[in-house]
């Protein structure tokens, strides 16, 4: 598959401003981002790219506290795969979980190893929100054992795989609206020798069955979380249930809590890192 690489120059540059621009354009279909000061590099399948739509969103920054400009580059499939693979670094979380590619060697031994294909660029474990979700799963490992778990918006399936390896009930369900993500999760489950421990479904929150899960993991984005939170609550088992929400900024926490309260969800704890947030909510 050919990709379009959009190089967005941010002046004056900061990591926070790069994250703001990323959040603004993410819904256009971009499936991976890298930062090389002063650029945010955004990648999207060629057939999904619309430069007019991109210009419209970037135009919203005109007259603001920083300026943006962009250039567009066609990245052929072979070059894209090679570039992504060469940039992919292993991720170690809490000295207990390693997310790596099959070609990474001589890494520190951790309790859990998750092997993914770095060509599948919609979830590599590097983002702060994924790291926080894994940290929370490690903290909750005792209460997770044997429980029915859903990874909503599963991407490459990292969270579903970690939950399965921590002893969650079999099978862990992984759901994503993107068929490529579903194929990625299935392939990575095989790669980690646990295909029997995961069931992958392609769809949105409408595929969820009432009263099915003890744990729901949803690392998506603020707008989708707000739109689908009621569906997540209905999918929790009647006697309690825990939802881990991430993929949004700390500034969005009040909005999520305001939406959660009428649904009978109470905040148990939260994590923050570099302005990104995770909420643990209990029914």
Image (tube, rainbow, N blue to C red):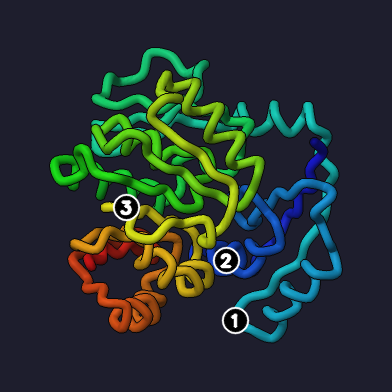
Instruction: Say whether residue 174 is left or right of residue 42.
Output: left
User: Tag 1: Cα neighbours inside 10 Å, few (<14), some, or many (≥20)?
Assistant: few
Q: Secondary structure at mark 1?
A: loop
The reply to whether dot 3 and dot 2 touch (C-beta < 8 Å) is no
User: Tag 2: Cα neighbours inside 10 Å, few (<14), some, or many (≥20)?
Assistant: some
Residue at 68% x, 79% y: name it: 61
Residue 105 in view? yes
The x, y position of residue 57, in whole percent, is 72, 74
- Which is closer to the viewer, label 1 or label 3? 3
Above/below status of 199 relative to 25? above
Residue that badge 3 annotates: 213
Nearer the N terminus, badge 3 or badge 2?
Answer: 2
Residue that badge 2 annotates: 23
Task: Determine which quarter of the picture holds residue 106.
Answer: top left
Above/below status of 143 relative to 61? above
Relative to the observer, which residue lies in front, 65 or 245?
245
Nearer the N terminus, badge 2 or badge 1?
Answer: 2
Image quadrant in which the N terminus is located: top right
Residue at 39% x, 81% y: name it: 255
Task: Give the CA distance from mark 2 to mark 1.
Answer: 17 Å
> Residue 201 — which label?
none
The x, y position of residue 7, in whole percent, is 73, 54
Nearer the N terminus, badge 1 or badge 3?
Answer: 1
């Amino acid at each position: 598959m050919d990709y379009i690489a959009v190089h967005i120059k941010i002046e004056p540059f900061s990591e926070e401003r790069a994250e703001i621009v990323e959040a603004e354009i993410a819904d256009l279909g971009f499936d991976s981002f890298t930062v090389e000061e002063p650029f945010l590099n955004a990648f999207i399948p060629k057939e999904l790219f619309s430069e007019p739509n991109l210009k419209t969103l970037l135009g919203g920054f005109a007259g603001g506290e920083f300026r943006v400009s962009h250039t567009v580059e066609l990245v052929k499939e072979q070059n894209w795969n090679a570039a992504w693979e060469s940039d992919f670094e292993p991720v170690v979380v809490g000295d207990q979980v390693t997310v790596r590619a099959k070609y990474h060697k001589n890494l520190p031994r951790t309790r859990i190893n998750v092997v993914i294909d770095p060509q599948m660029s919609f979830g590599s474990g590097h983002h702060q929100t994924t790291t926080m979700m894994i940290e929370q799963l490690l903290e909750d490992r005792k209460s997770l054992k044997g429980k029915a778990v859903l990874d909503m918006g599963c991407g490459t399936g990292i969270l579903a795989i970690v939950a399965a390896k921590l002893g969650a009930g079999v099978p862990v369900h992984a759901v994503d609206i993107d068929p490529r993500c579903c194929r990625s999760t299935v392939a990575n489950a095989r790669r980690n020798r646990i295909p029997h421990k995961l069931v992958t479904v392609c769809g949105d929150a409408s595929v969820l069955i009432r009263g099915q899960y003890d744990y729901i993991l949803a690392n998506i984005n603020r707008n989708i979380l707000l739109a689908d939170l009621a569906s997540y609550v209905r999918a929790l088992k009647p006697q309690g249930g825990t939802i881990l929400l991430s993929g949004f900024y700390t500034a969005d926490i009040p909005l999520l809590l305001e939406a959660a309260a009428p649904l009978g969800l109470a905040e148990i704890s939260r994590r923050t890192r570099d302005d990104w947030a995770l909420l643990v909510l209990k029914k």
